[in-house]
Amino acid sequence: MEIKLADIPEEVQQAKLRFGIVGNSPALVAAVSRAIRVAPIDLSVLITGESGSGKEFFPKIIHAYGSRKHNKYIAVNCGAIPEGTIDSELFGHEKGAFTGAVATRKGYFEEADGGTIFLDEVAELPLTTQARLLRVLETGEFIKVGSSTVQKTNIRVVAATNVDLIKAVEQGRFREDLYYRLSTVHISIPPLRDRGNDITLLARKFAADFAERYRTPQITFDEEAKQMLLHYRWPGNVRQLKNVTDQIALFNAGQTVGSSEIIQYLPPSSGVYTPAVAPSHNAHDYERERELLFNMLFRLQNEIDSLRKEIKGEHTVAEAMPKSLVKYSPAVDPIILGSERNDVETVPATLEETEKETIRRSLENNGGRRKATAKELNISERTLYRKIKEYGLE
């Protein structure tokens, strides 16, 4: 589902444009709208969402639309700071407080006084640091490492995490009181797989950005490629989509990209093509494509026999067969083709062998080009790719 541009509030459109946020999915628009609405009210905000979903944009919106916009904004990745130095980084230290502390140092809470501090991956904070953070949130007070002097700071805290903090609280890894203090207002960022057509909008943007930055011909996506982009689950979210698009833009510059090109840049562990929401017609796709494949098999066999007829003046197998066998039926064993003629090449005895042989011949006829092979067999590239891997025809 996608909201029409005319239905998106003007302030949300301006915020998206200002911060380079692409997409019109309802969940994304709701998240941006919520960030704008809470910005003027000096409350703590907790932003949750999967890794790579774009959580880092929302603290910037809150700061830019709030009363602290002219003061400092500092972003801190809590997961990137070693446990032994996190207190010093956040709250500062006195000279001689520990080995290597050769001078007094201000921490982020002192540096950002009057402004906003963004604590990314807040669930990674040690429990002792969580207690210090709780004190800052409740009283605005903190103590530098190695000092006994209480200092005051006037700061707004916006935190983000990809961890389920409720479970972390239950497991004793996160303080319950800190959770409720941080999550005065909660903003949930949707994963990319739930954003519908935003996926193709982002892919086009990333492709255009790459072409502009590196001065290369821009790629385009055909319809089947767009469907693959829409139905893949994107476990790495927007970050993964950008990574894949950049690779395709580099190695397929100026080309129209199909699903076979996209497959090459998806991690094998995540599956070749895993629909996030299976289309309604997929339930019978395999049976339909199986039938089409065998129709092609009989058509190819008929063409072979037609050539033999011209050469030897013989009747074709298809002409000798009952009409009901021209279209594949599971009740009919394909081995009957040529079973009574020694001069006709024997069709493989099993269903799998028949499929394998048909695909192999078509690949040879098309010089190994999978797109052309899939078109000739009247099946999707996804099915062809799966069959090639299954039968070892690489």
Image (cartoon, rainbow, N blue to C red):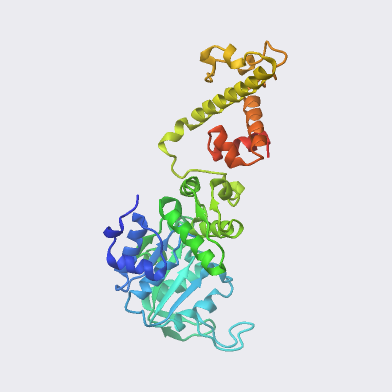
Question: In this picture, is 20 found above or below 200?
Answer: below
> On the rendered structure, is 142 left or right of 359?
left
Residues 147 and 83: in front is 83
Residues 308 and 278: in front is 308
Q: Which residue is at 45% across, 51% downward?
A: 193
Q: Which residue is at 50% across, 48% downward?
A: 225
**Percent position of residue 237, x then y:** 49, 56
Q: Which residue is at 72% across, 13% downward?
A: 342
Q: Quadrant of residue 70?
A: bottom left
**Percent position of residue 332, x then y:** 56, 15
**Percent position of residue 373, x then y:** 60, 37
Q: Which residue is at 35% across, 69% downward?
A: 15
Q: Quadrant of residue 243?
A: bottom right
* Residue 252 in view: yes
Residue pushed farthest right?
Answer: 342
* Residue 126 in view: no
Residues 205 and 9: in front is 205
Question: In this picture, is 167 found above or below 15?
Answer: above
How many numbered badges does the structure rendering display? 0
Residues 246 and 257: in front is 257
Question: In this picture, is 364 found above or below 2?
Answer: above
